[in-house]
Structure formats: structure tokens, C-alpha cells
Image: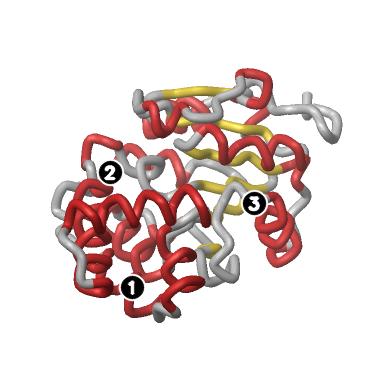
Amino acid sequence: MIPAPGSPYRTARDLRSAAAWVFDLDNTLYHHSANLFAAIDLRMKRFIAELLGLPEDAAFRVQKQYFRDFGTSLRGLMTLHRVDPHRFLDYVHDIDLSAIRPDARLDAALAGLPGRKIVFTNADRAHADRVMARLGVAQHFEAVFDIFSADFVPKPDPAIYRRLVDLHGLDPTTCVMVEDMAKNLVPAHALGMTTVWVDTGSDFGRHGHDPAVVHHATDNLSAWLAGVAAA
């Protein structure tokens, strides 16, 4: 039976009734063991060091301070230093993606999963496209709502979730949101979405975790989605 509006999709059969699936990108669509953030963090640190004429250890502290104060390091750089976001994102995402391999199980699960599929990421569209191409799943997604779509306001700002919903004509009560950062599920839950937390085992991903707003949890998205698709 399809849950009433506002009720979460509790079983695999219920989940197959969802009208739309909203997926985070990094450490969600691909397994966190790829460790892309280590390379991205290094590129951010080097960008800030070159921009501000700082040693890399001081640049790293600035990077993390901007992240805490502004939600993303990029927003801090844009606000305080008028950095061109295209220049910054092109630089920090110029990394080796060979750790990401084609995921046939994820591809099959997405193919067998009814409902629209959208990527919702604090990264940019170019990075999302490269990652999805490596995974072999780009054909399943109708749109990418990236940091440009969000006017550089990152998750978990609730206004950006409403913009996503309005832009793509979604009914949140018939949507499922999948995310590795637990705090980013809070606004989704408040809108009435069914939430899926991909637990990477990291303190960063667990920060802000509230069991009351997590309907499903997994440490292996491909395997979990395959179970839903097969229900």
C-alpha cells in the first residue's frame, strides 16, 4: 500500500512508489573508499595558499574557517576575496578520478527503480558529470541541481531545498532523498521527504545525525538500491 502523503516510505515496496529520487553525489553515488575529498582538500589548500600568499598549513586553517563560517570554503572566498567561482571549482575539481570505477550494480538498480532521478550537490555540474560518467550512470539522471543552481548557498540551508522542489516541480512527500551527510537530511525530512542516510563511518558524515529524521540507513548504496529495485 502506498503511504499517505507526509508518511515515509518504510518498505522496499513502498519505496518503489516514490515519484522522485534525489541523490547527493560525493561519497553517496560512489563508495567513500575512493577518498576524492582528500585530493579536493589538497587542491583547495593550494588555491588559497596561492591566492593569499600563505604557507599551506595556514591556508588549510583559512579553508576550514571559511567552511565553518560560510557553509563552504568557496562562499567565504567569494564573499571576502571576490573569487570567481568558475576559476575556483575548475581548479579544485581537477583531480584524478581513476579511483571511481564503473558500478554495474548501481547502474542496474537505477535502471530498475521507478521514478525521476536528480542529483543534488554542493559541487558543480562539471564535476557531477565527470563522476557519473566514471560510474556509468549518467543516463539515469534527468537533472543536476548544483551549487550554481543554488546561487552558491550550500546544503543544508532549507531555502535551497525549497528551490530544488520548486524548480523541478517535485512533491516532497513523494520524494526520497539519499545523502551521506546526516545533517543534510534534516531539511529534507522537514519538507516531508523520505530520507536515506549513507553511513560512511566518518565523524564528518555523522555530524548532526538525528535518528528521528533518518528513515533508512545503509553503508552500501548499490546493494541497498538493488534490494529496492528487486522488491
Which amino acid type is shown beneath numbered disc 3?
Asp
Q: Residue at x 39, y 44 (%)?
A: 29
Where disc 2 sits, the SS reads loop
Q: Residue at x 60, y 37 (%)?
A: 185
Q: Residue at x 48, y 29 (%)?
A: 207
The correct choice, above or below, for 153 with respect to 86 in the image is above
Q: For residue 88, which numbered disc appears in the image? A: 1
Residue 176 seen by the camera: yes
Q: For residue 166, which numbered disc appears in the image? A: none
Task: Choose between 132 and 75: the one closer to the eye.
Answer: 75
The correct choice, above or below, for 104 with respect to 59 in the image is above
Classify mark 2: residues with Cα within 10 Å, few (<14), some (14-19) or many (20+). some
Q: For residue 103, which numbered disc appears in the image? A: 2
Q: Quadrant of residue 109?
A: top left
The correct choice, above or below, for 231 with respect to 115 in the image is above
**Can you tell which of label 3 and label 2 is closer to the viewer?**
3
The correct choice, above or below, for 155 with respect to 55 in the image is above
Real-space Cα distance between discs 2 and 1?
Answer: 29 Å
Which amino acid type is shown beneath numbered disc 2?
Asp
Q: Residue at x 42, y 65 (%)?
A: 74
Task: Choose between 155 and 8: the one closer to the eye.
Answer: 155
Quarter of the figure that contains the N terminus:
top right
Mark before the other along the chain sequence, 2 or 1? 1
Q: Which residue is mark 3?
A: 157
Quarter of the figure that contains the C terminus:
top right
Where disc 3 sits, the SS reads loop
Task: Choose between 226 and 67: the one closer to the eye.
Answer: 67
Q: Point out residue 3 in the picture as x, y percentages from the top left corner.
A: 79, 27
Real-space Cα distance between discs 3 and 2?
Answer: 31 Å
